[in-house]
């Protein structure tokens, strides 16, 4: 019985450590774990941005930032994360058109367009004939939409 109590105490201590590392304000264990998962996903996105910049030979300068897209199949549907260091006027419209074209309904979304652009969206498939949408196809379609948005913006700036 002492070892069970000890294990429980050790688990609680580790969860509190995880809570402090991830800046979570959650009180229950499952919420702490959810916050940690979101924190890790944010770190992955930052790594992807840095890898993208390194691969394209860009610096972290404001003008050179290109939106980074991560798309993941999750239990509820398709999780889309889109981030750019700069503001991207009109990009949200292009991305939402992708959702519509692919038959995805937005179940949850968070968007920030102040100074930078950040979109987190959960898309669920509308009623179709049992076909499942592949996350890779969603990502490629969003990247194509970003290219179209970029060309459209460049046309308006000339």
Image: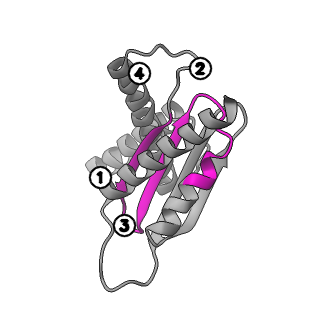
In this view, the mark in front (2 or 3)? 2
N-term-proximal mark, 1 vs 2: 1
Identify which residue is drawn at 46% across, 79% down. 126
In this view, the mark in front (1 or 2)? 2
Disc number at residue 53?
4
* Whole-percent x, y for residue 114 in the image: 73, 36
2 displayed left or right of 93: left
Q: Secondary structure at mark 3?
A: loop
Identify which residue is drawn at 62% across, 36% down. 155
N-term-proximal mark, 4 vs 2: 4
Residue tagged 1 = 4
Which quadrant of the figure contains the N terminus?
Answer: bottom left
Disc number at residue 75?
3
The residues tagged by marks 4 and 2 sit, at their Cα atoms, a distance apart of 12 Å
Q: Is residue 2 visible?
A: yes
The residues tagged by marks 1 and 2 sit, at their Cα atoms, a distance apart of 56 Å
Residue tagged 2 = 63
In this view, the mark in front (3 or 1)? 3
Which quadrant of the figure contains the C terminus?
Answer: top right
């Amino acid at each position: 019985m002492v070892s069970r109590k000890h294990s429980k105490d050790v688990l609680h201590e580790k969860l509190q450590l995880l809570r402090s590392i991830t800046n979570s304000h959650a009180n229950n264990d499952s919420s702490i774990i959810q916050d940690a998962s979101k924190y890790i996903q944010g770190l992955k996105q930052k790594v992807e941005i840095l890898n993208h910049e390194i691969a394209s030979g860009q610096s972290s300068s404001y003008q050179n930032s290109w939106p980074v897209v991560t798309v993941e199949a999750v239990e509820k549907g398709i999780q889309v994360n889109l981030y750019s260091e700069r503001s991207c006027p009109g990009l949200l419209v292009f991305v939402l058109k992708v959702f519509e074209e692919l038959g995805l309904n937005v179940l949850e979304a968070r968007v920030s367009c102040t100074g930078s652009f950040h979109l987190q969206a959960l898309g669920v498939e509308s009623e179709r004939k049992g076909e499942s949408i592949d996350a890779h196809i969603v990502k490629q379609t969003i990247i194509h939409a970003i290219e179209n948005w970029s060309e459209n913006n460049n046309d308006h700036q000339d």
